[in-house]
Image (spheres, rainbow, N blue to C red):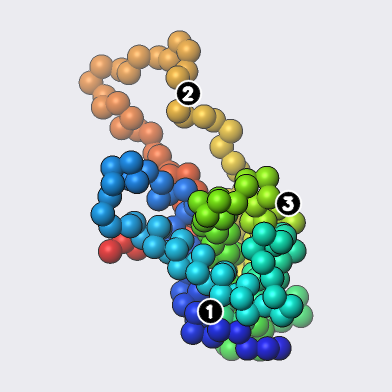
């Protein structure tokens, strides 16, 4: 395999899963002087992807990028991954914390790839790409991410939350019961922010 822009890619390996797509909206209207963590990560991701395109053989233009190229990019990133993913033949298959080393490959964690694709998808459109031509939104990419998630969940014995809430908390509920006097509104409601993976807590600062 050819070597492509290792320093940049190393930076990519530091991709974190904490910035869920869409979490860093807002603030441009306020003319915020400092970009959020999400915004700066998105900018770095976009630069890395641009670098990948420039180093691609044969050369690849952004305008001609398809979902298949995005998959190629994601697979390329696996070599910089830090997440042990056991093969089906490994005795530690399905163990979240194996007691001994094994020769299974390190890959990018699903959460990192998922967040990365979200940021690049946004960046593509911010750079003038048409939404319907967005390679990061391609069906093949969604399916690939789903496969990676399910495969890693099995290999590492991690149960990702399966239930998706169908409720729409933002919508007003007709005939909602009034709050019982003496209770704080929402005191009992445990809210989990959408898009935050329960298996890793965001580190701020
Ligand atoms: Zn293994």
Please name the residue that numbered disc 2 is placed on: 171
Decide which of tag 1 and tag 2 comes sooner along the chain: 1
| Number of the front mark, 1 or 2 | 1
Which residue is painted at 62% across and 46% down in the image? Answer: 131
Going from N to C along the chain, the mark reached first, 3 or 2, is 3
Q: Residue 156, located in which quarter of the rendered image? A: bottom right
Q: Does any atom of ligand 1 lie closer than 8 Å to the CB of label 3? A: no
Q: Quote the CA–CA distance across marks 1 and 2.
A: 42 Å
Identity of the residue drawn at 48% across and 44% down: 194
Residue 37, image x and y in percent?
A: 36, 60
Q: Position of residue 193 (x, y in %)?
A: 43, 44
| Quadrant location, the N terminus | bottom right
Q: Is residue 142 left or right of residue 100?
A: right
Tag 3 residue: 139
Q: Position of residue 120 (x, y in %)?
A: 55, 59
Determine the secondary structure under disc 2: loop
Foreground pick, 64 / 142: 64
Q: Is residue 84 visible?
A: no
Mark 1 element type: helix
Q: Disc 3 and disc 2: Cα gap in Å?
A: 29 Å
Residue 45: give x, y in percent of width and height. Answer: 50, 66
In this picture, is 119 found above or below 102? Answer: above
Q: Residues within 10 Å of mark 2 (few under 14, many from 20)?
A: few
- The residue wearing badge 1 is 9
């Amino acid at each position: 395999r050819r070597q492509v822009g290792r320093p940049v890619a190393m930076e990519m390996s530091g991709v974190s899963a904490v910035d869920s797509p869409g979490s860093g909206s807002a603030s441009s209207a306020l003319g915020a002087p400092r970009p959020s963590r999400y915004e700066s990560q998105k900018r770095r991701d976009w630069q890395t992807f641009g670098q990948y395109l420039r180093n691609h053989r044969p050369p690849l233009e952004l305008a001609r990028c398809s979902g298949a190229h995005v998959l190629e990019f994601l697979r390329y990133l696996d070599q910089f991954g830090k997440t042990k993913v056991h093969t089906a033949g490994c005795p530690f298959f399905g163990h979240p914390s194996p007691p001994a080393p094994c020769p299974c490959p390190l890959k990018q964690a699903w959460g990192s790839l998922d967040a990365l694709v979200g940021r690049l998808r946004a960046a593509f459109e911010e750079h003038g790409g048409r939404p319907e031509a967005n390679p990061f939104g391609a069906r093949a990419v969604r399916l690939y991410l789903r496969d990676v998630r399910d495969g890693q969940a099995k290999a590492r014995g991690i149960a990702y939350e399966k239930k998706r809430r169908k409720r729409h908390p933002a919508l007003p509920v007709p005939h909602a019961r009034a709050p019982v006097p003496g209770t704080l509104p929402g005191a009992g409601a445990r809210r989990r922010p959408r898009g935050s993976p329960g298996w890793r807590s965001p580190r701020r600062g």
